[in-house]
Image: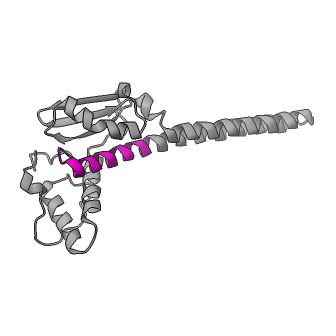
Amino acid sequence: MTESNDMSDETGSKGQLARADRPWRGDEHALQVAAAREAGLPAGQTAIDLYTEGFRRGLQERDPADGAIVLRGRTVLRAEEMMRSLKPMLRFLRIGPDSIGLRVVEGEFELRVAGQAADASEPVQGAVRMVLLIWIASGLIGFALLQGGSQMAALLAWGVGLLVGASALRRGQVSGRTMLAARLAVGLGILAHEEQLILPPAERGGS
């Protein structure tokens, strides 16, 4: 874990927001928060943004093995203690306990959200409702054209409706999973800032 003095405000030269391709580092975090405060910016929001970006770098949006969303980081908590801290965030995101897997090994945690839960999130459900409307509308239009004696136009309307609906459903699934993953990273960032008992993944070789 990063030492406590890494998490305190330090004076020094102003740093820029950590780049997405660089690991999260406690010393850089403290310098950037201090720089934000000196610049008159809200230091708390800057700290949350930095924590969130750190968790995003340790995020796997879809595990090839089981389709789960995976987030990683460090903690001083045991698994059951961390799960208690996560419950309010998971309840807010409407993720049931049966869809969550958490393990803590030697100060590093891995949080997994089952693929079924990720694909059943609110944005995905909204996409499903929109697709159903598209299919119903295309079906009604096609039926009306068929009643009017235009069989080819009816088939065309049904085919276009199916294709457009399938495309919208696929986009909804992808965007819904991405949105849920982003919300999880933000939730961990807020939790890290408020409790400072979890941190983003460390740089390989230690930070």
74 is higher (above) or lower (below) than 21 = above
User: In terms of depth relative to the viewer, which is nearer, 58 or 146?
Assistant: 58
Residue 57 visible in image: no
Question: 109 left or right of 182?
Answer: left
Residue at x-position 15% and y-position 48%:
203
Determine the image quadrant of residue 48: bottom left
Task: Provide residue 167's location: percent of width, then percent of height.
Answer: 59, 40
Q: Is residue 186 magenta?
A: yes
Taking the magenta stretch, the answer to whether it contains residue 84 is no
Residue found at the far right of this picture: 149
Q: Is residue 131 above or below residue 80?
A: below
Q: Which residues are magenta?
A: 179-197
Left or right, 171 with respect to 68, comes to right
Q: Position of residue 10 (x, y in %)?
A: 10, 65
Give the quadrant of residue 145: top right
Identify the residue at image location x=26%, y=74%. Answer: 40
Residue 132 visible here? yes
Residue 2 at x, y percent in the picture = 10, 49
Residue placed most toward the observer, 81 or 17: 81
Q: Nearer the viewer, residue 15 or 78?
A: 78
Q: Main secondary structure of the magenta part?
A: helix
Above or below, 35 against 185 in this view is below
- Residue 118 left/right relative to 184: right
In the orientation shown, which residue stands out farthest toward the top? 98
Question: What number of labels is visible?
Answer: 0
Write the residue at 20% across / 64% down: 33
Q: Is residue 106 left or right of residue 121?
A: left
In the image shown, does 113 or 65 lie closer to the viewer?
113
Q: Quadrant of residue 32?
A: bottom left
| Residue under the image location 13 percent in, 55 percent down | 7
Across and down, in percent, residue 30 comes to 15, 61
